[in-house]
Image: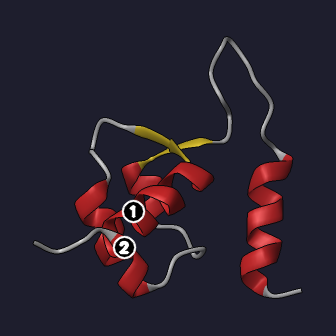
């Protein structure tokens, strides 16, 4: 198991819903400081994530993929 997978599992293991908030949700600063993303991925996240937003890891990855795969006009 790679260190990325280990970190991913550790972050998901603590995800329990409390007070109606998803504990797997992270702010932009937390995601940008994560070891789960490469420097290139963080460049994309800088563009697609909003400062005031809260994102699950799956959501952040999906936004990144949508941005990278969008059609250029």
Mark 2 highlights which residue? 69
Count the marks: 2
Q: Is residue 24 toward the left or the right of residue 39 in the image?
A: right
Name the outermost residue toward the left: 73
Percent from the top left, x then y, of residue 26? 52, 45
Who is closer to the viewer here, 63 or 23?
A: 63
In this rendering, is residue 36 above or below 9?
A: below
Q: How crowded is mark 2: few (under 14 residues within 10 Å), some or many (20 or more)?
A: few
In this rendering, is residue 19 above or below 7?
A: above
Percent from the top left, x then y, of residue 37? 52, 76
Name the outermost residue toward the top: 19
Who is closer to the viewer here, 72 or 49?
A: 72
Element carrying mark 1: helix
Percent from the top left, x then y, of residue 41? 41, 78
> For residue 72, which quarter of the picture?
bottom left
Q: Which residue is drawn at 36% across and 73% down?
A: 69
Q: How far apart are marks 2 and 1 (CA)?
A: 5 Å
Q: Residue at x 30, y 68 (%)?
A: 70
Element carrying mark 2: helix
Q: Residue at x 60, y 74 (%)?
A: 36
Q: Do the residues labelled 2 and 1 touch (CB within 8 Å)?
A: yes
Q: Is residue 55 toward the left or the right of residue 57 in the image?
A: left
For the N terminus, the image quarter is bottom right
> For residue 18, which quarter of the picture?
top right
Mark sitting on residue 53: none
In this rendering, is residue 53 above or below 56?
A: above
Percent from the top left, x then y, of residue 5? 79, 76
For the C terminus, the image quarter is bottom left
> For residue 48, which quarter of the picture?
bottom left
Q: How is the image coloured?
A: secondary structure
Q: How crowded is mark 1: few (under 14 residues within 10 Å), some or many (20 or more)?
A: few
Mark 1 highlights which residue? 66
């Amino acid at each position: 198991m790679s260190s990325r997978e280990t970190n991913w599992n550790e972050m998901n293991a603590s995800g329990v819903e409390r007070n109606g908030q998803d504990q797997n949700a992270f702010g932009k600063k937390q995601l940008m400081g994560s070891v789960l993303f490469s420097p290139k991925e963080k460049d994309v996240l800088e563009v697609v994530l909003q400062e005031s937003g809260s994102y699950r890891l799956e959501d952040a990855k999906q936004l990144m993929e949508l941005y990278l795969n969008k059609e250029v006009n």
